[in-house]
Amino acid sequence: MWERIIVILRKEFIQVLREPRMRGLLLIPPLLQLIIFGYAVTLDVDNARIAWMDGDGTPASRALLARFEGSGRFQVVATPHSEREVQDILDRGDAHAVVRVLPGFARDLAQQKKSAEVQVLLDGTNSNTASLVSAYAAQVVAEYSNDVLPSQTKNDQTIKLSVRSPGSAPTNMTVAQAVPGTRVWFNPDLRSRNYFVPGVAVNILFMVTLTLTAQAIIREKEIGTMEQLMVTPMRPIELMLGKTLPFALVGLVDLVMVTAGALLIFRVPFRGSFLVLLFSATVFLLTSLGAGLFLSTISRTQQQANMASFFFSSPAFMLSGFQFPIRNMPMPVQYLTYLNPLRYFMEIVRGVFLKGVGVAVLWPQMLTLFVYGALILGLSASRFHKSLD
């Protein structure tokens, strides 16, 4: 049995490595996705562009401006002097926000009035960026107020931050005098790269094994060699193993390559066990290989298999938590994600990378993956046998 399987394995590797298009599928998608999600796709705002409108023109307001510039998060790109200029800056998207120091700011601080106001006008086109810029501005103002207000008035006097987006009502935030201590676990710098790059490993493993498995079997049908294999003494189970195992190995190699790139190039933390990651990936392969077998039984050409894999994989990725948090989805959609095997593997990979957890924590996801994988692979294998018969 194993001699015949090894023959098919050797044949598949020779056929894959000989064809330029197949070699490209093995190398280009992993590298391309790693580069895109490592460098280009980010939710971080490391250099927010702001316009500074100083309606007070005092040393106190200029000291606040120095705090914004010295924070390392803001770049002042304009200094408007009228409401019209503010509107034009936000309309053209020249700045993420306009910070306005209202007249009387220094006077209110000196006279120890109840509050001194600073206004932030946000470009709410990108809600994530607007939220981050608002939070960064609140932090800078809080640190400034903690330093400049007299200690005996800190409990009674505040700097009020008024935040609004165009077309919305202003939201007033009373900035606390003492900046609260915050400790972030697992991703202290809140880098979105640490969130996305581990998900690329899930993406690569699924797409490579799904697409290549389906194409390898359909290619045999297109060139007419499937009939020759069917008349050999090889049994369907041996043919199925010989066709799927090469791409399982290719998927694991791509997983190792993406993991190495995440660690060496992007410095993504890896706090868990690589053996746990490798074992979980092997369990997940039951699902991806089974799906590839299923696509090979319902498609007649490689083009049909590519289209079917696209319609199958796109909803799976959208509901996996790869980019959009599942907790933010509507409740019916959240329940639907429990039917998605990619959700469980995504949780495992991020848990191993960022949290450093092991089998003691991740066993429910591993067990669910095994059940789904066994069902999908079993049903696909039975359909594969019938197609050969």
Image (tube, rainbow, N blue to C red):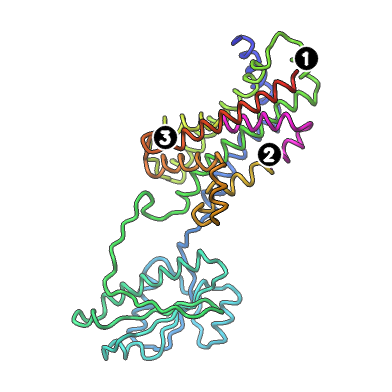
Residue 133 vs 209, above or below: the answer is below
Task: Identify the residue under disc 2.
Answer: 309
Mark drawn on residue 273: none
The kind of residue tagged 3 is: Trp
Residue at 78% across, 32% down:
301
Q: Is residue 291 left or right of residue 98?
A: right
Q: Is residue 291 magenta?
A: yes
The kind of residue tagged 2 is: Ser
Q: Is residue 107 magenta?
A: no
Name the front one of labels 3 and 1: 3
Residue 82 vs 274, above or below: the answer is below
Residue at 50% across, 45% down:
197
Q: Quadrant of the C terminus?
A: top right
Task: Identify the residue under disc 3.
Answer: 363
Residue at 50% across, 68% down:
130
Question: Magenta part of the protein: which range?
Answer: 286-310
Q: Is residue 155 left or right of residue 8?
A: left
Query: Spatial distance from mark 2 to mark 1, Cα to Cα?
Result: 27 Å
Residue 369 vs 189, above or below: the answer is above
Task: Identify the residue under disc 1.
Answer: 228
Residue 253 drawn at (x, y percent): 53, 30
